[in-house]
Image (cartoon, rainbow, N blue to C red):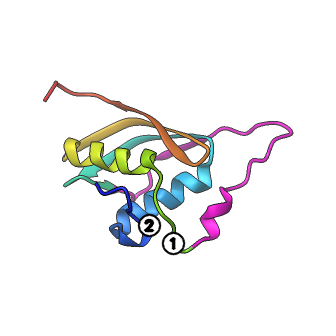
Amino acid sequence: MSINVTKSSLSPARRRLVEVMQWVNFGRLENLHVRGGEPVLDPLPRIVREIKIGGDNGPRPESRREDFLLKNHLTELFAHLDELGEGTVEVLEIKHGLPFRLLVAGPPA
């Protein structure tokens, strides 16, 4: 993916995934199905939010913005989904509203 990818240039499913991760802020998505490299969000995967006592547990501030340049974490995530093609991301760990780690089960490519 290009370095200058914007949220508005994403497919609706990928935009929705970005919005879900921004809402979660800290936590994980479990059993995220992927079809044709696109996240399947209907129904939503299991969402586990990390709540920090005394911390800011709200959504990311940029979640209110209609469009913005994607950080490298997001472009890398979408490249991995493209590579996966069809399958399930067992765990997508989220930190600061961004993908941090993927756990994908299956045989090597």
In the image, which residues are magenta? Answer: 40-65
Residue 48 appears left or right of 12: right
The residue drawn where x is 52% and y is 46% is 98
Q: Position of residue 46 (x, y in %)?
A: 48, 44
Element on which disc 1 rests: loop
Q: Is residue 8 above or below residue 83?
A: below
Q: Quadrant of the C terminus?
A: top left
Q: Is residue 97 magenta?
A: no
Q: Position of residue 12 (x, y in %)?
A: 37, 69
Label annotation for residue 7: 2
Res 95 quadrant in image? top right
The residue drawn where x is 34% and y is 38% is 89
Q: Position of residue 19 (x, y in %)?
A: 52, 61
The residue drawn where x is 33% and y is 50% is 78
What kind of residue is marked 2? Answer: Lys
How busy is the neighbourhood of tag 1: few (under 14 within 10 Å), some, or many (20 plus)? few
Element on which disc 2 rests: helix
Q: Earlier in the sequence, mark 1 or mark 2?
A: 2
Residue identifier under label 1: 67
Residue 28 appears left or right of 40: right
Q: Is residue 93 above or below residue 67?
A: above
Q: Are marks 1 and 2 in contact (CB under 8 Å)?
A: yes
Residue 65 appears left or right of 69: right
Q: Main secondary structure of the magenta part?
A: loop
Q: Quadrant of the N terminus?
A: bottom left
What kind of residue is marked 1? Answer: Asp
Q: Position of residue 64 (x, y in %)?
A: 64, 70
Res 59 quadrant in image? bottom right
